[in-house]
Image (cartoon, rainbow, N blue to C red):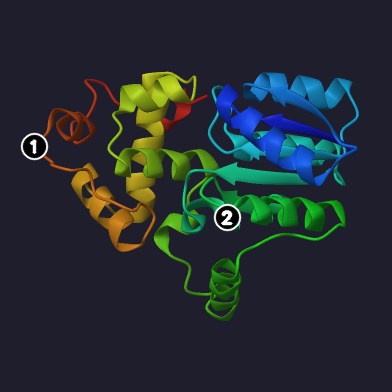
Amino acid sequence: MRILIADDHAVVRQGLKQILAEAFKRASFGEAANSQETLERIWKEHWDMVILDLTMPGRSSLEVLKEIKQRHRSLPVLILSMHPEDQFAMRLLKAGASGYMTKESAPEELVGAVRKAMAGGRYISAAMADKMASLLVNEAQAAPHETLSDREFLTLIQIASGKSVSVIARELSLSVKTISTYRVRLLEKMGLSNNAQLVHYAFQNHLVRDRPQDLASPAATEIGKDPPALASPSNSR
Protein backbone atom coordinates (compact mmCIF):
# COMPACT_ATOMS: atom_id res chain seq x y z
CA MET A 1 0.00 0.00 0.00
CA ARG A 2 1.36 3.42 -1.01
CA ILE A 3 0.23 6.47 0.99
CA LEU A 4 0.97 10.06 0.03
CA ILE A 5 1.04 12.50 2.97
CA ALA A 6 0.56 16.12 1.91
CA ASP A 7 1.21 18.70 4.62
CA ASP A 8 3.40 21.80 4.68
CA HIS A 9 4.85 20.95 8.10
CA ALA A 10 7.62 18.34 8.10
CA VAL A 11 7.01 17.46 11.75
CA VAL A 12 3.36 16.66 11.01
CA ARG A 13 4.32 14.49 8.02
CA GLN A 14 6.80 12.53 10.11
CA GLY A 15 4.28 12.07 12.92
CA LEU A 16 1.63 10.75 10.53
CA LYS A 17 4.12 8.38 8.92
CA GLN A 18 5.10 6.99 12.30
CA ILE A 19 1.48 6.38 13.34
CA LEU A 20 0.53 4.74 10.06
CA ALA A 21 3.73 2.71 9.70
CA GLU A 22 2.98 0.97 13.00
CA ALA A 23 -0.51 0.02 11.85
CA PHE A 24 0.28 -0.80 8.20
CA LYS A 25 3.56 -2.71 8.26
CA ARG A 26 3.81 -3.12 4.50
CA ALA A 27 2.92 0.46 3.62
CA SER A 28 5.33 2.80 1.86
CA PHE A 29 5.02 6.56 2.09
CA GLY A 30 5.58 9.65 0.02
CA GLU A 31 5.48 13.31 1.04
CA ALA A 32 4.39 16.62 -0.47
CA ALA A 33 4.76 20.07 1.09
CA ASN A 34 2.39 22.17 -1.04
CA SER A 35 -0.55 21.91 -3.42
CA GLN A 36 1.48 21.88 -6.64
CA GLU A 37 3.86 19.19 -5.39
CA THR A 38 0.86 17.12 -4.25
CA LEU A 39 -0.74 17.19 -7.70
CA GLU A 40 2.53 16.50 -9.50
CA ARG A 41 3.21 13.42 -7.40
CA ILE A 42 -0.34 12.14 -7.88
CA TRP A 43 -0.15 12.59 -11.67
CA LYS A 44 3.26 10.93 -11.99
CA GLU A 45 3.09 8.11 -9.44
CA HIS A 46 0.68 5.44 -8.26
CA TRP A 47 -0.91 5.93 -4.83
CA ASP A 48 -3.49 3.90 -2.93
CA MET A 49 -4.34 6.66 -0.46
CA VAL A 50 -3.79 10.41 -0.05
CA ILE A 51 -3.86 12.23 3.28
CA LEU A 52 -4.32 15.91 2.47
CA ASP A 53 -3.89 18.88 4.78
CA LEU A 54 -6.68 21.41 4.30
CA THR A 55 -4.51 24.54 4.38
CA MET A 56 -1.27 24.39 2.44
CA PRO A 57 0.59 27.02 0.41
CA GLY A 58 -0.81 27.49 -3.09
CA ARG A 59 -4.22 26.43 -4.31
CA SER A 60 -6.88 25.61 -1.74
CA SER A 61 -7.26 21.95 -0.85
CA LEU A 62 -10.91 22.12 -1.91
CA GLU A 63 -9.71 22.87 -5.44
CA VAL A 64 -6.94 20.27 -5.22
CA LEU A 65 -9.44 17.63 -4.10
CA LYS A 66 -11.80 18.42 -6.98
CA GLU A 67 -8.96 18.15 -9.49
CA ILE A 68 -7.81 14.83 -8.04
CA LYS A 69 -11.33 13.46 -8.29
CA GLN A 70 -11.68 14.58 -11.90
CA ARG A 71 -8.70 12.44 -12.93
CA HIS A 72 -8.63 9.71 -10.25
CA ARG A 73 -12.21 9.30 -9.13
CA SER A 74 -11.58 6.15 -7.08
CA LEU A 75 -8.46 7.42 -5.25
CA PRO A 76 -9.32 7.77 -1.53
CA VAL A 77 -8.47 11.22 -0.14
CA LEU A 78 -8.67 11.77 3.62
CA ILE A 79 -8.65 15.41 4.72
CA LEU A 80 -6.75 16.30 7.87
CA SER A 81 -7.23 19.79 9.30
CA MET A 82 -6.84 22.05 12.30
CA HIS A 83 -10.32 23.46 11.60
CA PRO A 84 -13.41 22.07 13.35
CA GLU A 85 -15.72 19.81 11.33
CA ASP A 86 -18.48 22.42 11.20
CA GLN A 87 -16.36 24.63 8.97
CA PHE A 88 -15.36 22.45 6.04
CA ALA A 89 -16.40 18.81 6.38
CA MET A 90 -19.67 19.04 4.46
CA ARG A 91 -18.11 20.86 1.50
CA LEU A 92 -15.21 18.42 1.30
CA LEU A 93 -17.41 15.33 1.53
CA LYS A 94 -19.58 16.69 -1.28
CA ALA A 95 -16.43 17.24 -3.32
CA GLY A 96 -15.47 13.58 -2.95
CA ALA A 97 -13.34 13.35 0.20
CA SER A 98 -13.23 9.94 1.87
CA GLY A 99 -13.34 11.56 5.27
CA TYR A 100 -12.50 14.60 7.36
CA MET A 101 -10.53 14.58 10.59
CA THR A 102 -9.11 17.26 12.84
CA LYS A 103 -5.45 17.12 13.80
CA GLU A 104 -6.57 16.74 17.40
CA SER A 105 -7.97 13.27 16.63
CA ALA A 106 -6.48 10.28 18.41
CA PRO A 107 -3.97 8.10 16.47
CA GLU A 108 -6.31 5.08 16.55
CA GLU A 109 -9.04 7.24 15.00
CA LEU A 110 -6.71 8.11 12.12
CA VAL A 111 -5.87 4.45 11.57
CA GLY A 112 -9.56 3.55 11.59
CA ALA A 113 -10.35 6.30 9.11
CA VAL A 114 -7.63 5.10 6.73
CA ARG A 115 -8.88 1.51 6.97
CA LYS A 116 -12.45 2.61 6.21
CA ALA A 117 -11.38 4.79 3.28
CA MET A 118 -9.25 2.02 1.82
CA ALA A 119 -12.27 -0.30 2.01
CA GLY A 120 -14.29 2.16 -0.08
CA GLY A 121 -16.17 3.79 2.79
CA ARG A 122 -16.25 7.32 4.15
CA TYR A 123 -15.20 8.36 7.63
CA ILE A 124 -17.23 10.93 9.57
CA SER A 125 -17.56 11.42 13.29
CA ALA A 126 -20.83 10.75 15.10
CA ALA A 127 -21.33 14.49 15.61
CA MET A 128 -20.87 15.15 11.90
CA ALA A 129 -23.30 12.35 11.01
CA ASP A 130 -25.96 14.03 13.17
CA LYS A 131 -25.30 17.39 11.50
CA MET A 132 -25.59 15.88 8.03
CA ALA A 133 -28.88 14.21 8.94
CA SER A 134 -30.22 17.51 10.26
CA LEU A 135 -29.20 19.33 7.07
CA LEU A 136 -30.98 16.76 4.92
CA VAL A 137 -34.18 17.30 6.88
CA ASN A 138 -33.88 21.10 6.62
CA GLU A 139 -32.30 21.28 3.17
CA ALA A 140 -34.60 24.10 2.07
CA GLN A 141 -33.35 26.29 4.92
CA ALA A 142 -29.72 26.66 3.87
CA ALA A 143 -27.67 29.08 5.97
CA PRO A 144 -26.28 32.16 4.16
CA HIS A 145 -22.68 30.91 4.33
CA GLU A 146 -23.65 27.73 2.49
CA THR A 147 -24.35 29.80 -0.65
CA LEU A 148 -20.71 30.92 -0.87
CA SER A 149 -18.18 29.54 -3.32
CA ASP A 150 -15.27 27.56 -1.87
CA ARG A 151 -12.85 30.50 -2.10
CA GLU A 152 -15.41 32.91 -0.62
CA PHE A 153 -16.09 30.53 2.24
CA LEU A 154 -12.38 30.10 2.94
CA THR A 155 -11.97 33.89 2.95
CA LEU A 156 -14.88 34.18 5.40
CA ILE A 157 -13.24 31.73 7.80
CA GLN A 158 -9.86 33.41 7.58
CA ILE A 159 -11.21 36.92 8.18
CA ALA A 160 -13.40 35.71 11.05
CA SER A 161 -10.30 34.10 12.59
CA GLY A 162 -8.66 37.52 12.81
CA LYS A 163 -6.44 37.48 9.71
CA SER A 164 -5.94 40.55 7.56
CA VAL A 165 -6.61 40.58 3.83
CA SER A 166 -2.87 40.81 3.16
CA VAL A 167 -2.12 37.78 5.35
CA ILE A 168 -4.87 35.73 3.69
CA ALA A 169 -3.56 36.69 0.25
CA ARG A 170 -0.05 35.60 1.19
CA GLU A 171 -1.19 32.28 2.65
CA LEU A 172 -3.32 31.43 -0.41
CA SER A 173 -0.73 32.74 -2.89
CA LEU A 174 -3.26 35.22 -4.30
CA SER A 175 -3.24 38.99 -4.71
CA VAL A 176 -4.69 41.35 -2.10
CA LYS A 177 -7.06 42.62 -4.81
CA THR A 178 -8.39 39.08 -5.38
CA ILE A 179 -9.02 38.45 -1.67
CA SER A 180 -10.69 41.87 -1.44
CA THR A 181 -13.01 40.82 -4.26
CA TYR A 182 -13.95 37.61 -2.44
CA ARG A 183 -14.64 39.69 0.67
CA VAL A 184 -16.95 42.04 -1.23
CA ARG A 185 -18.80 39.14 -2.80
CA LEU A 186 -19.34 37.21 0.40
CA LEU A 187 -20.57 40.29 2.26
CA GLU A 188 -23.08 40.93 -0.54
CA LYS A 189 -24.29 37.33 -0.68
CA MET A 190 -24.74 37.14 3.08
CA GLY A 191 -26.36 40.55 3.45
CA LEU A 192 -23.62 41.86 5.75
CA SER A 193 -22.13 45.35 5.79
CA ASN A 194 -18.72 44.99 7.38
CA ASN A 195 -16.20 42.65 8.97
CA ALA A 196 -17.54 43.17 12.48
CA GLN A 197 -20.87 41.68 11.36
CA LEU A 198 -18.98 38.92 9.55
CA VAL A 199 -17.05 37.98 12.70
CA HIS A 200 -20.26 37.99 14.75
CA TYR A 201 -22.02 35.76 12.19
CA ALA A 202 -19.14 33.28 12.06
CA PHE A 203 -18.98 33.05 15.84
CA GLN A 204 -22.76 32.66 16.24
CA ASN A 205 -22.85 29.90 13.60
CA HIS A 206 -19.88 28.03 15.11
CA LEU A 207 -17.69 28.57 12.06
CA VAL A 208 -14.86 29.74 14.32
CA ARG A 209 -14.16 28.71 17.87
CA ASP A 210 -13.20 32.12 19.23
CA ARG A 211 -13.73 35.75 18.34
CA PRO A 212 -10.65 37.87 17.59
CA GLN A 213 -9.41 38.91 21.06
CA ASP A 214 -10.09 42.61 20.74
CA LEU A 215 -11.65 44.55 17.86
CA ALA A 216 -9.41 47.45 18.86
CA SER A 217 -6.22 45.41 18.52
CA PRO A 218 -3.91 46.08 15.50
CA ALA A 219 -4.82 42.77 13.83
CA ALA A 220 -8.54 43.29 14.29
CA THR A 221 -8.33 46.89 13.14
CA GLU A 222 -6.66 45.74 9.95
CA ILE A 223 -9.28 43.09 9.19
CA GLY A 224 -12.08 45.58 9.88
CA LYS A 225 -10.57 48.13 7.57
CA ASP A 226 -11.29 48.04 3.85
CA PRO A 227 -8.23 47.98 1.58
CA PRO A 228 -7.56 51.28 -0.24
CA ALA A 229 -9.08 49.96 -3.48
CA LEU A 230 -11.46 47.04 -3.53
CA ALA A 231 -11.45 44.98 -6.71
CA SER A 232 -14.49 44.45 -8.83
CA PRO A 233 -15.57 40.80 -9.33
CA SER A 234 -14.15 40.83 -12.87
CA ASN A 235 -10.62 41.30 -11.52
CA SER A 236 -10.54 38.09 -9.48
CA ARG A 237 -8.45 35.16 -10.53
Label 1 Cα crowd, 10 Å radius (few <14 / some 14-19 / many 20+): few
For the question of whether residue 220 can be seen, the reply is yes
For the question of whether residue 98 can be seen, the reply is no
Circle on res. 89? 2
Residue 211 rendering spot, x and y as whole percentages: 24, 49
Side of 136 relative to 161 (left or right): right
Residue 99 rendering spot, x and y as whole percentages: 68, 54
Q: Which residue is at a point 52% across and 24% down the rendered structure image?
A: 237
Residue situated in front as seen by the camera: 180 or 31:
31
Label 2 Cα crowd, 10 Å radius (few <14 / some 14-19 / many 20+): many
Side of 217 relative to 129 (left or right): left
* Above-or-below relation of 16 to 197: above
Side of 70 relative to 101 (left or right): right
* Above-or-below relation of 79 to 232: below
Which three-letter amino acid code belongs to the residue tagged 2?
A: Ala
Which three-letter amino acid code belongs to the residue tagged 1?
A: Ala
Q: Which residue is at a point 61% across and 40% down the rendered structure image?
A: 62
Q: Which residue is mark 1?
A: 216
Disc 2 to disc 1, how far (Cα)? 32 Å
Residue 230 rendering spot, x and y as whole percentages: 30, 26
Q: Which residue is at a point 89% across and 23% down the rendered structure image?
A: 45
Q: Quadrant of residue 159?
A: top left
Q: Quadrant of residue 145?
A: bottom left
Residue 59 rendering spot, x and y as whole percentages: 59, 27
* Above-or-below relation of 44 to 201: above
Side of 121 relative to 91 (left or right): right
Residue situated in front as seen by the camera: 138 or 100:
100
